[in-house]
Amino acid sequence: MINQEALKLAKKLWNYHQLHHTLEKSDCILVLGSMDTRTAERGADVYMQGYAPFIIFSGGLGKLTRDMWKGTEAELFATIALDKGVPREAIFIENKSTNTGENILFTQQLLQEKKLNVESFIVVQKPYMERRSYATFKKHWPHKKLIVTSPLLTFEEYPNELISMEKLINMMVGDLQRIKLYPEKGFQVYQEIPDDVWAAYEELVAMGFDRQLVKWES
């Protein structure tokens, strides 16, 4: 059982990871694959609301999904979008990527192949990965206009049968560590981390929420 202090600290990380961008009409919706199919539903909803003329689903099979599904993340997400009313001709699929950097690289290649000029994106990601996705995209695509959104769920609502509260906290801790360390590795642009957010991270690590930390920081 996760105690109330851990939940309070974790919610601080949750709030930091989300950017609360306001949706605006854009050239393209880019949905990043994962084990969380609610991201596909959010991407489809944004399309159906008329925010962009087409939608790209990006994702092969990652370390969490390769044992779950036979098809790729992008293909499964596209099926969900079709079921929600997105027309097939508005959907493009990138099904090779296994991380956020590859999502960007292979999406760039797809756009070049399709001769599509995209200057503004709505990126759809899991709630706790909004900020890291933004920082990664701005590193590799600095001149593109970028809005990030995610399923409209609260911290308390987010866990489900696939993503427990314990897993969620571990993932948020790991993502915050990467936000701090990855800029010096050239993977992301710098993001300021408030002192109270970093203190919450350190307390959660001390409590044992360290399963998603990168190994070269121990």
Image (cartoon, rainbow, N blue to C red):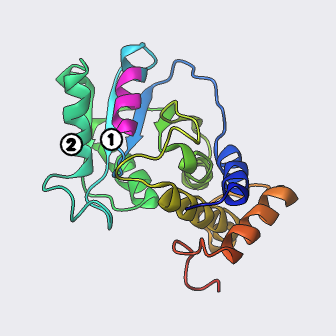
Q: Residues within 10 Å of mark 1 (few under 14, many from 20)?
A: some
Q: Residue furthest right?
A: 195
For numbered disc 2, what is the local secondary structure? Answer: helix
Q: Residue at x 69, y 44 (%)?
A: 15
What numbered label is drawn on residue 50? none
Q: Residue at x 52, y 33 (%)?
A: 153
Q: Nearer the viewer, residue 95 or 109?
A: 95
Tell me the kind of residue under disc 2. Leu
Residue 147 higher or lower than 54, as above or below:
below
Q: Earlier in the sequence, mark 2 or mark 1?
A: 1
What numbered label is drawn on residue 37? 1
Q: Residues within 10 Å of mark 2 (few under 14, many from 20)?
A: some
Residue 157 higher or lower than 26, as above or below:
below
Residue 62 higher or lower than 140, as above or below:
below
User: In this rendering, does residue 119 appear at all?
Assistant: no
What residue is shown with label 2? 76
Position in image of residue 133 (x %, y %): 55, 50
Q: Are marks 2 and 1 in contact (CB under 8 Å)?
A: yes
Residue 49 higher or lower than 131, as above or below:
above
Distance of label 2 from label 1 (alpha carbons) = 8 Å
For numbered disc 1, what is the local secondary structure? Answer: loop
Q: Residue at x 52, y 30 (%)?
A: 152
Q: Nearer the viewer, residue 194 or 10?
A: 10
Position in image of residue 94 (x %, y %): 27, 47
Q: Quadrant of the C terminus?
A: bottom right
Q: Residue at x 39, y 48 (%)?
A: 108
Which numbered disc, 2 or 1, marks the residue closer to the eye? 1
In this image, 5 relative to 142: left or right? right
In this picture, which residue range is highlighted in magenta?
37-45
Question: What is the magenta segment's predominant secondary structure?
Answer: helix
Q: Quadrant of the N terminus?
A: bottom right
